[in-house]
Amino acid sequence: MTPRIRKLTAIFVFMALIVPLDVFGQENEEEEEESPWAAEVGIRYLSKFTNYGVDLGQDRAAMPIGCGITHLSGLGLSAEVVNVLGSSGGIQQSSLSLEYDRPLSELLSVSFELSHYFYKSDTLNALSGLSNSLSVNADLDFGSLSLSVFYDLYLGGAGASFFGASVTGFYSVQELVVVPLLHLGFVSQEVQGAFLKSNRGKSKALIGSTAQSVTGLSNVSLLVVLLYPFGEGFSASLTPSLLYSPSELSTHTSQFVWSAGIKYSREF
């Protein structure tokens, strides 16, 4: 599997992480010449809708549906719609992203992503006032081990930034791909008091309208991504995760979350 297709498999990865996963190891030197284009479509179930350790779904499950297309040059375009489940759920968030991946050497690669977000008007989402983001990621690939750092800048309103690092391992048991990952993230954001953990359940009169600053550790995540290919171009994933989120933007300080998904990919 090529680096480009390996990048696309990140659609299955737990949404608390924004670091792309290179889940199939090094490219085989004897691999046939790549097709110029690759596309995929996938659907996931998330036990909790979170990102960066931030609660984005009022402690509810969600079902994102996404698709993407990339060119051999490293350019890519992707889209995703997130449906939050429950009686007052529905489509809470959708996004459109333009991506560019560039290898700088056999070990080092960088990626850039520009995204635009659409939010349901009444969503209680700490990022709902931030309609655009710019993401930068650098990855050191040692084959069975990868080290990554990222910086995400959200634009709109008072803005926000998330940054951190992750260590990822890559193993296979016959057809099953096993990807353990340790992730550390930090946040700096100005938010309305209604989004803070300490204010959940309080009336608007008690909370007030003054924005408050949230900085520091956003989350520490320990997870294992399990990927299994089946059929022609299909693969399934299961991702159990332990999430520690001391930030005021999280509903729970410590929790177990998981996701599962199915993806279809094709080169042409």
Image (spheres, rainbow, N blue to C red):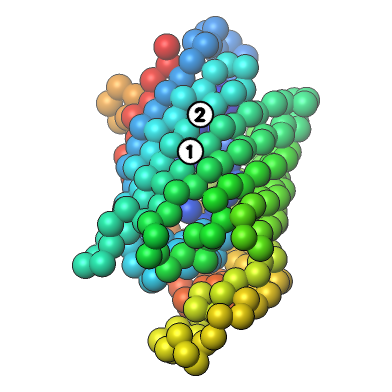
Q: Is residue 235 above or below residue 150?
A: above
Q: Is residue 184 above or below residue 197?
A: above
Q: In the orientation shown, which residue stands out farthest toward the left?
A: 87
Secondary element type, mark 1 = strand
**Position of 120 compared to 185: left or right?**
left
Disc 2 to disc 1: CB gap under 8 Å: yes
Residue at 71 percent of width and 71 percent of height? 216
Q: Is residue 179 above or below residue 245?
A: above
Identified by mark 1, the residue type is: Leu
Residue 109 drawn at (x, y percent): 72, 32
Q: Is residue 6 above or below residue 132?
A: above
Q: Which mark is residue 129?
A: none
Q: Nearer the viewer, residue 257 or 66?
A: 66
Residues at marks 2 and 1, CA–CA distance in whole angstroms: 8 Å
The image quadrant that residue 245 belongs to is bottom right
**Position of 59 compared to 99: left or right?**
left
Identified by mark 2, the residue type is: Leu
Q: In this rendering, which labeled residue sits more in front, label 2 or label 1?
A: 1
Residue 260 drawn at (x, y percent): 34, 50
Q: In the orientation shown, which residue stands out farthest toward the top?
A: 33
Q: Which mark is residue 77?
A: 2
Q: Which residue is mark 1?
A: 96
Sequence-wise, which precedes: disc 2 or disc 1?
Answer: 2
Examine the rendering and report whether any part of residue 57 can be seen.
Answer: no
Residue 244 drawn at (x, y percent): 56, 71
Residue at 46 percent of width and 65 percent of height? 125
Residue at 51 percent of width and 75 percent of height? 195
Q: Quadrant of the C terminus?
A: top left
